[in-house]
Amino acid sequence: MAAYRYCEAVTALQARNFSYGIRLLPESKRLAMSALYALARRVDDIGDGELSADRKQEQLLATRALLDEIRAGAVTEEDTDPIKVALADAARRFPVPLDAFDELIDGVEMDLRGEEYRTFEDLKVYCRCVAGSIGRLSLGVYGCADPKRGAEYADTLGLALQLTNILRDLREDAVNGRTYLPAEDLARFGCEQGFASPTPPAGADFAGLVAFEARRAQGYFEEGLRLLPMLDRRSRACTAAMAGIYHRLLGRIAAEPESVLRGRVSLPGWEKAYVALSGLAGGRS
């Protein structure tokens, strides 16, 4: 189906970490995951784009309407939106919890409002919206031996990945006027001044802050990866590959905290490929 090919192209171009994992899936699941990613990317792009806040809100409302059409079974292959067509087909083939996309949109709307997070419990709400939702959507495609417990672990793994993202993008977000780390943590380590400079705030325990948040993310990785034995071999490999890439990234950040202030920390392609192959072989990297 041409709609799926479009979604695959979006995924290959814009989701290098994600695409390493879904390559390990059988075709039907790989195509469904590309449709999930393509709509999630559209939502993210609306939030991060250059449109006015009002126009962004209009587009998010249009995306909610798109989801309502899919839920109502009102989408045909003749529709001109390839992402809608592919996702509608994926939702017919798999028990995809489409309501999780509404949560993702909720998270983007939190960004549009300039939401700030006083405590970690506040931040968890945001993380579960923008990342836990993706874990639960993915589980709908993978299938799971224990759906209820599996959804909890998928949500927790998403939280680990999002915390890693927050650490990786600390400087970039600060330059764009966003701070995601909880205010109580910033105060604890003397980092209330923010991260708009390539060097840590004067007198701050920046390394202590990163170590604290990295340990927190590590705990969520350990809990979330309990999902793996509940999945079939190929889905387990896909999840292990994606989580493994972020887990290694977290390790790099923890080992050299100030690197996140100099630019985006990433893994070379060969290392991502190694992690993906390790996942296929049943390992955890």
Image (cartoon, rainbow, N blue to C red):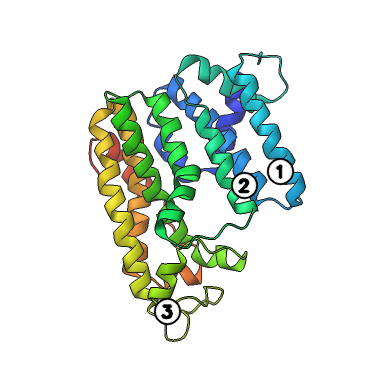
How far across and how far down the image is residue 41, in percent?
Answer: 58, 40
Q: Which mark is residue 76?
A: none
Task: For mark 2, give the secondary structure.
Answer: helix
Residue that mark 1 sits on: 57
71 shown above or below 7 = above
Residue at horizontal 59 percent and vertical 34 percent from the top: 39
Residue that mark 3 sits on: 190
Within 10 Å of the Cα at label 1, are there few (<14), some (14-19), or many (20+) other Cα atoms?
some
Are the residues tagged 1 and 2 within 8 Å (C-beta)? Answer: yes
Q: Would you say 112 lies left or right of 149 here?
A: right
> Amino acid type of disc 3?
Gly
Residue that mark 2 sits on: 109
How far across and how far down the image is residue 90, in percent?
Answer: 52, 20
Q: CA distance from mark 3 to mark 2?
A: 29 Å
Q: Earlier in the sequence, mark 1 or mark 2?
A: 1
**Does residue 182 appear in the picture of this structure?**
yes
Residue at horizontal 67 percent and vertical 39 percent from the top: 60
Q: Earlier in the sequence, mark 3 or mark 1?
A: 1
Residue at horizontal 38 percent and vertical 40 percent from the top: 155
Q: Earlier in the sequence, mark 3 or mark 2?
A: 2
Residue at horizontal 45 percent and vertical 76 percent from the top: 191
> Amino acid type of disc 2?
Glu
